[in-house]
């Protein structure tokens, strides 16, 4: 198996996170009540953009001679870890607010990871990585903003004095 540079390892991480994000949006969509259905469109767009991110990351991995297999293997590990974290966090939860709270944390993590890819690519002088990060980072920031705003919107509709069941 090929050895990965730090930048290539970060590519594997953001690839794995984009893979996990697709499952997370499906999970949260399943937590929506009928009166929260308007959020399904946002989740679907996030899922589609995560799929496009995955495609673009795999495309870059294709261009890295002899590294694609190692990047994909590392990405699958990251996906597994992120999925396990989601399952642990959402275990026993069925309310959309809990799902969007998780997405807020996950999207913040993706913003951080993509920011690191961007910084490393600038130092490495690799335009392929930099261009991918410049494309992905605004999307991830928007996903974070959407997850946070939706969390707050749902929270504002909650009765803060209701006893948890």
Image (cartoon, helix red, strand yellow):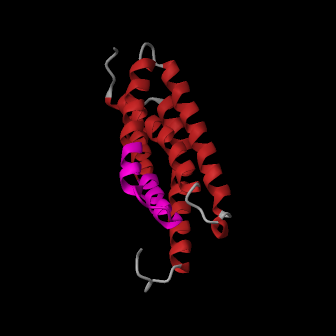
Q: Is residue 152 above or below residue 142?
A: below
**Residue nearer the viewer, 85 or 124:** 85
Going 36% across and 52% down the picture, which residue do you hit? 88
Q: Can the viewer see residue 151 in this picture?
A: yes
Q: Is residue 90 magenta?
A: yes
Q: Position of residue 160 (x, y in %)?
A: 45, 83
Q: Is residue 19 left or right of residue 91?
A: right
The quarter of the picture where the C terminus appears is: bottom left
Q: Position of residue 19 (x, y in %)?
A: 50, 38
Say whether residue 160 is magenta.
no
In terms of depth relative to the viewer, which is nearer, 46 or 158? 158
27, 10: nearer the viewer: 27
Image-based side of 153 in relation to 14, left or right? right
* Vertical relation: 42 (above or below) 81: below
Per the picture, the main secondary structure of the magenta-coloured stretch is: helix
Whether residue 122 is visible to the viewer of this picture, yes or no, is no
Q: Quadrant of residue 69?
A: top left
**51 left or right, relative to 130:** right
Question: Going 68% across and 56% down the picture, which residue do you hit?
Answer: 41
Q: Residue at x 59, y 38 (%)?
A: 51
Q: Residue at x 44, y 83 (%)?
A: 162
Report x, y in % for residue 108: 42, 55
Give the camera-side residue of 85 and 93.
93
Look at the image and tell me in which quarter the N terminus lies.
Answer: top left
Residue 40 % position (x, y): 65, 57
Residues shaded magenta: 83-108
| Furthest-bottom residue in this view | 161
């Amino acid at each position: 198996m090929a050895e990965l540079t730090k930048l290539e390892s970060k590519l594997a991480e953001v690839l794995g996170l984009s893979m996990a994000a697709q499952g997370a949006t499906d999970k949260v969509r399943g937590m929506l009540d009928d009166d929260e259905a308007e959020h399904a469109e946002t989740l679907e767009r996030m899922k589609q953009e995560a799929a496009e991110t995955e495609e673009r990351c795999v495309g870059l991995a294709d261009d890295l001679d002899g590294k694609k297999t190692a990047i994909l293997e590392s990405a699958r590990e990251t996906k597994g870890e992120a999925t396990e974290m989601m399952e642990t966090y959402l275990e026993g939860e069925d309310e959309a607010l809990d799902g969007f709270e998780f997405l807020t944390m996950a999207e913040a993590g993706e913003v951080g990871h993509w920011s690191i890819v961007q910084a490393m690519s600038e130092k490495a002088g690799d335009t392929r990585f930099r261009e991918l990060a410049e494309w992905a980072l605004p999307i991830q920031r928007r996903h974070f903003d959407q997850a946070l705003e939706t969390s707050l919107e749902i929270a504002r509709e909650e009765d803060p004095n209701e006893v948890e069941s």
